[in-house]
Image: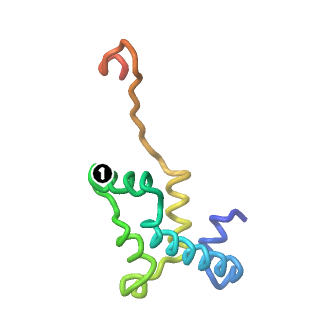
Amino acid sequence: ASLIEELKEGDEKHPVLADTFQKAKENLLRQTKNYIFESPYETGSYNLRMLLETPVWHINDYTGEMEGPDAEAEPLTMKECAEVVEQCLFGRSKAVSLCIGNIDEKGSQK
């Protein structure tokens, strides 16, 4: 079975994987909370992203998913993570790219 399939089967069927998943969540939470200790370049890049992108998740949104009242009411599960990974890796996506050169946008889309 693939890792995604094992994650979707859940904690009870794969207790060792569940422990690893829990440790990974704790590590991610710690790293997320420590973003303020990143280099000025990393912090600036994050702040720029907050200004330019929409919609965008704030650090508090990430930590709120992993701890606090919302996380206790609806804890993040292995199954949920596996479904998102499966969708991202194997789902359909659309990408549009333009090339740089002496061709205009309309010509590059042909």
Relative to 45, does residue 71 appear above or below in the rendering? below
The kind of residue on which mark 1 rests is: Glu
* Whether residue 23 is situated above or below residue 108 in the rendered picture: below
Residue 8 picture quarter? bottom right
Residue located farthest toward the front when viewing the structure as drawn: 40
Q: Is residue 42 above or below residue 100?
A: below
In which quarter of the view is residue 55 placed? bottom left
How many other residues sit within 10 Å of disc 1, few (<14), some (14-19) or many (≥20)? few
Q: x, y percentage for residue 13?
A: 68, 81
Residue 81 vs residue 61: left or right?
Answer: right
Residue closest to the eye, 48 or 8: 48
Q: What residue is shown at x 49% (from left), y 62% (from top)?
A: 84
Query: Which of the 4 image quadrants contains residue 35?
Result: bottom left
At a point 53% along the width and 71% down the height, the residue shown is: 28
Q: Please indicate whether residue 59 sits to the left or right of residue 87 in the image.
A: left
Give 2 or 38, whichever is nearer the viewer.
38
Q: Position of residue 33 (x, y in %)?
A: 45, 73
Give SS at disc 1.
loop
Q: Quadrant of the C terminus?
A: top left
Residue drawn at x 45%, y 45% is 93
Disc 1 marks which residue?
Answer: 53
